[in-house]
């Protein structure tokens, strides 16, 4: 494990994130991961932060609300063949998605939430702000495009202070 600053490999990481990264949550004995493609790495309140956008319908949303922390894995290598479909389409409410696609986890360094046991860059994030998006402040065309088909399924911003960041091979 190589500890690096939160903005290490920023261009590569943002490129990976725009395609698929994994957001992992843990509450009690339940560990779940979901694919995310939206997110931002930056600074707020003088802290390094990762901003995730998670729809209210996700099981991940429920876990995030209780755990107040999450980890992010940006994969640098090959993935198990079904990882993207299982973690990006199925719900952890009804199945153990990690077992289903052959993914395992390693303990977090600073948090109770583990990171995926995959080569890549990992962020451990402590939620410091949570806020749902709403129609009233959103561009009308974007609202129409993303949110009118399923009512009240807006993304919720979870701003996580990055408390550790490292690369594994
Ligand atoms: C490429 C890709 C990117 C995705 N990005 C997001 C995202 O940023 N936010 C979100 O809420 N869902 C996103 N999803 C959908 C979730 O991964 C999917 O609904 C997942 O099954 C939720 O799992 P859960 O119910 O176990 O939390 C994405 C799916 C894919 C395939």
Image (tube, rainbow, N blue to C red):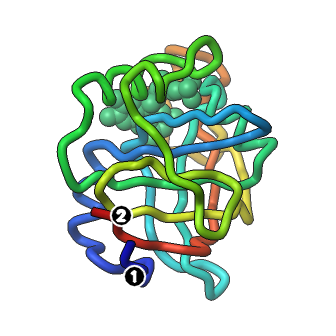
Q: Are marks 1 and 2 in contact (CB under 8 Å)?
A: yes
Mark 1: secondary structure:
loop
Task: Decide: is 134 above or below 59.
Answer: below
Q: Residue at x 68, y 62 (%)?
A: 111
Asked whether 91 or 109 is in front, the reply is 109
Confirm whether residue 22 shows in the render: yes
Residue identifier under label 1: 4
Residue identifier under label 2: 121
The answer to whether residue 27 is left or right of residue 73 is right
Asked whether 169 or 92 is in front, the reply is 169
Furthest toward the left, the residue is 78
Q: Quadrant of ligand 1?
A: top left
Quote the CA–CA distance across marks 1 and 2. 9 Å
Point out which mark residue 134 bears: none
Counting from the top left corner in percent of width and height, residue 141 is at: 41, 35
Task: Decide: is 129 above or below 151.
Answer: below
The answer to whether residue 3 is left or right of residue 50 is left
Counting from the top left corner in percent of width and height, residue 143 is at: 50, 33
The quadrant the C terminus occupies is bottom left
Q: Residue at x 42, y 83 (%)?
A: 5
Say few, some or many: other residues with alpha carbon within 10 Å of mark 2 (under 14 / 14 to 19 / 20 or more).
many
Quadrant assignment, res 44: bottom right
The answer to whether residue 65 is left or right of residue 33 is right
Q: Residue at x 64, y 52 (%)?
A: 113
Asked whether 25 or 28 is in front, the reply is 28
The quadrant the N terminus occupies is bottom left
Confirm whether residue 141 shows in the render: no
Q: Is mark 1 within 8 Å of ligand 1?
A: no
Counting from the top left corner in percent of width and height, residue 54 is at: 57, 39
Counting from the top left corner in percent of width and height, residue 116 is at: 45, 48
Say few, some or many: other residues with alpha carbon within 10 Å of mark 1 (under 14 / 14 to 19 / 20 or more).
some
């Amino acid at each position: 494990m190589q500890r690096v600053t939160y903005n290490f490999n920023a261009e590569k990481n943002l490129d990976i994130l725009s395609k698929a990264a994994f957001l992992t949550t843990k509450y009690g004995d339940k560990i779940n991961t979901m694919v995310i493609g939206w997110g931002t790495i930056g600074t707020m309140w003088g802290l390094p932060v990762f901003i995730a956008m998670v729809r209210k319908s996700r099981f991940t949303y429920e876990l995030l609300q209780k755990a107040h922390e999450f980890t992010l894995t940006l994969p640098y290598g090959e993935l198990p063949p079904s990882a993207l479909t299982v973690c990006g389409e199925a719900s952890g409410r009804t199945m153990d998605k990690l077992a289903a696609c052959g993914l395992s986890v390693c303990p977090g360094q600073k948090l109770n939430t583990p990171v995926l046991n995959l080569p890549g860059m990992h962020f451990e994030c402590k939620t410091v702000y949570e806020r749902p998006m709403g129609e009233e402040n959103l561009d009308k065309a974007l609202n129409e495009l993303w949110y009118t088909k399923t009512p009240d399924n807006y993304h919720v911003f979870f701003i996580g202070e990055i408390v550790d960041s490292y690369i594994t091979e």
